[in-house]
Image (tube, rainbow, N blue to C red):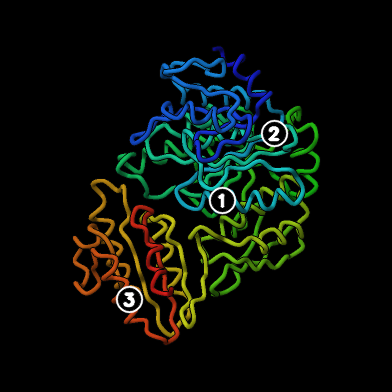
Amino acid sequence: MKTEDLYSIYLKHPQVSTDTRNIPDQSIFFCLKGERFDGNTFAKEALDKGAAYVVTDSRQPFDDSRLIQVEDVLQTLQQLAAYHRSQLQIPVIGITGTNGKTTTKELVTAVLSRKYRVAATKGNLNNHIGVPLTLLSIRPEHEIAVVEMGANHPGEIAELCEMSAPDFGLITNIGKAHLEGFGSMDEIFRTKTALYRSVLSRNGTLFVCADDELLFRHAAELATIPEVPSMIPWYLDHGFGPDWKASAERLTLFTYGSGQNAQCRAQLCGESLHLRFEWDCDGTVYPVRTQLVGRYNFPNAMAACAVGTFFAVPPDECVAALESYSPGNSRSQVIEKGAVRVIMDAYNANPTSMEAALRNVAAIPAERTFLALGDMCELGTESHKEHQRMVRLIQSLSFTDVFLFGPEFAETDAPQEWKFTDMEVLKKALAERLGNRPAQLLIKGSRAMRMEQVMEIFS
């Protein structure tokens, strides 16, 4: 079946599913395959549960006019998503980066939702399956789309850009993650910055953190920074508007951060548990008090301010969106458990995010500070060196109540009493050490380490 013909079916049944546990009535079910499952075996079940059509690449043991036979289901899903994207007339914002991309996507979506109907990536469905599903969730009523893109191997962002064709691009940062898949930092840089090249190939706009010297320098080489005395009236005339695609003059680079070279500028406000900053928006200063933990979230929040500014969201609405956003899913959460304040940041970890979290918690005043840290996964040949570096950092920051979990930390020269390979033993030792006195506890580690189990000591 040609993509155009499948698209005609999709327009009549504009919901897709890849999981028989969640099949919207009259949706199209795609039989995806993975290492441990084959969606083709669920074709009959999907139809029985209300799917209008099932896309399969395996001959089924039954005949049904609702079966759509293709050579490769995943490729078909991606081609359908790309075709749908080509029919859209709304701006698409692509977001990638090593750390903070999901939080930034959530903040950008919160800000834009104050003025527009926004389609955005759900959770962190940001890979070769999640991106097409996000694109196919965009409906006629949506006015802007925010698409998060993740990568764990070379060239992946370029592939996702081929599908999503972003008009606007934002890279949160570039750090050490998935080194096992990428092989080197140079390859990570080339893969992530494919977003910049993709956007500029369509005469689009890049949102760039001016405080990030690496990204700022690279973006400046690719684009031209206009001399603009005041961004507010300028973007109203030349930035986003009803005829944004037809605009002959487009802003190619919009910068944000704390330095004088940032067009959207703010300053951090002292040391505190939650992120606080003052945003100077065209001469008017807006204090912003977020519910996010850590100064490392400053560029994420400022990215949302920059996007909101460009898309003409009133500054007070931007502030309200940032202040009302409450982090979840173990990302920069603060959870009060009696006398213990838990900083839950256990959704994932890599050397860049781990270092930022450690430096942040070291700067927060507390009677006692505890660390429960899990291994950082997918670091390949760099793994031992990076885990050893974290141990040195912990020691240099003078932490003493330390609980390291996993085989990678076990191979370091950290004090033996810090190292645990059994979660139950770790939880028992941590609970005994915490007692009933006031303390703060940082929980962080890669997803595979399931460090959220530490919270069971409070139940």
**Which numbered disc, 3 or 2, marks the residue that appears first in the sequence?**
2
**Which numbered disc, 3 or 1, marks the residue that appears first in the sequence?**
1
| Residue position for label 2 | 139
In x, y percent, where is residue 49? 56, 33
- Residue 430 numbered mark, or none: 3
Residue at image point 61% right, 36% down: 24
For residue 68, say whether it is visible: yes
Q: Is 254 on the left-hand or right-hand side of 455? A: right
In x, y percent, where is residue 338? 49, 81
**Which numbered disc, 1 or 2, marks the residue that appears first in the sequence?**
2
> Which amino acid type is shown beneath numbered disc 1?
Cys
> Which amino acid type is shown beneath numbered disc 3?
Leu
Asked if 274 appears above or below 161 in the picture, the reply is: below
| Residue position for label 1 | 209
Q: For the residue carrying disc 1, how many other residues have a C-alpha within 10 Å: few (<14), some (14-19), or many (20+)?
A: many
In x, y percent, where is residue 79? 53, 22
User: Mark 3 or mark 1: which is in front?
Assistant: 3
Q: Is 243 on the left-hand or right-hand side of 377? A: right
Residue at image point 80% right, 40% down: 237
Residue at image point 63% right, 25% down: 84
How far is mark 1 from mark 2, CA to CA? 31 Å
> Which amino acid type is shown beneath numbered disc 2?
Arg
Q: Nearer the viewer, residue 416 or 238?
A: 416
- The quadrant of the image that shows the N terminus is top right
Query: Helix, strand, or loop for circle 3?
Result: helix
